[in-house]
Image (spheres, helix red, strand yellow):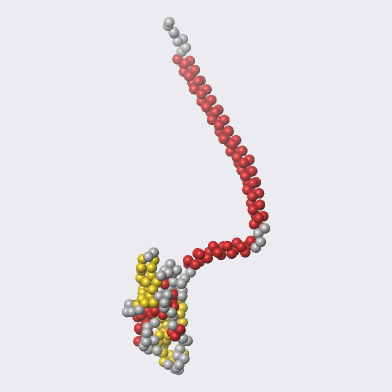
Amino acid sequence: MIEINLIPDVKQELIKAERVRSIVISFSILIGLIALGIVAMLAIYVFAVQTVRSALDDEGIKTESAKLASVEDLSKTLTIQNQLNKISELNDQKKMNSRLFDAIAAVIPPAPNNIQVSTLSVNAADSMVAIEGQAAGGFAALEVFKKTIGGAVMEYTVDEEKLQTPLASDISTSDVSYGEDSTGTKVLRFTIRFKYPEELFSPKTPTFAFKLINEGNATDSYLGVPKSIFVQRADDLEGNQ
């Protein structure tokens, strides 16, 4: 059987174009409906669900606030709790300034270079120590004291590793003059300043010892601070005022 296509090619192209258009329109309508559905769901979530959740949260806040308000001395309790939380932090940051007494006791030279201390002061901003004192042995005793300070080292342990650092740097003397102590003895008055290492007062160095280049060592566990090295500053000599 022979079939003859009597439809012109132009007509066939038109039919094909209409079919494609119908498919495109159908997909466009479908996508539009899906988009409208998504928008509707978002609108329901924003204007309905979120509103309900916000109302529930507000009610919860009011309830919990009422419970807190009913607690007796709430402000004092919160203040104390905050202070307790900071105790450990402050304890880790505190400086171990009492070690200065151990350091001074370790570098006081023995007789006949007797040194007595009148005033000790620490300038944390500049990491400087100032010692006001007097020496019955005159300039020789002062020089021995200065060299002893310069020869002292601090040994400490960090993470089971033994380390060492000089006790003092930038050592200087000033305000050197003669005077009389409370017994009328002629003494040399002076002020020594030196820069101390950060490890000296750091709580991160719990284990430490002071050692001298020539002899001796001193730790805070067995070395006390002799009271005899602390005296009142000597008076001016007559004519030296």
Q: Quadrant of residue 107?
A: bottom left
**One can see residue 172 in this view:** no
Pinpoint residue 41: horizontal percent, then vertical percent. 59, 36
Q: Is residue 14 left or right of residue 156?
A: right
Of 132 and 65, the residue lying toward us: 65
Q: Quadrant of residue 75?
A: bottom right
In the rendered view, tell whether residue 148 sits above or below residue 32. below
Extreme-top residue of the structure:
1
Of 90 and 217, the residue lying toward us: 217
Image point 41% across, 80% down: which residue?
A: 105
Pinpoint residue 23: horizontal percent, then vertical percent. 51, 23
Extreme-left residue of the structure:
214
Extreme-front residue of the structure:
222
Q: Quadrant of residue 136?
A: bottom left
Q: Is residue 77 left or right of residue 216?
A: right
In the rendered view, tell whether residue 43 sits above or below residue 237. above
Pinpoint residue 55: horizontal percent, then vertical percent. 65, 46
Of 10 and 112, the residue lying toward us: 112
Q: Is residue 167 left or right of residue 73?
A: left
In the rendered view, tell whether residue 229 sits above or below residue 203. below
Q: How many marks?
A: 0
Quarter of the image with the N terminus is top left
In the rendered view, tell whether residue 93 sits above or below residue 29. below
Image point 60% across, 40% down: which residue?
A: 45
Image point 43% across, 73% down: which residue?
A: 127
Image point 54% across, 30% down: which residue?
A: 31
Pinpoint residue 169: horizontal percent, then vertical percent. 37, 75
Of 199 and 43, the residue lying toward us: 199
**One can see residue 33 in this view:** yes
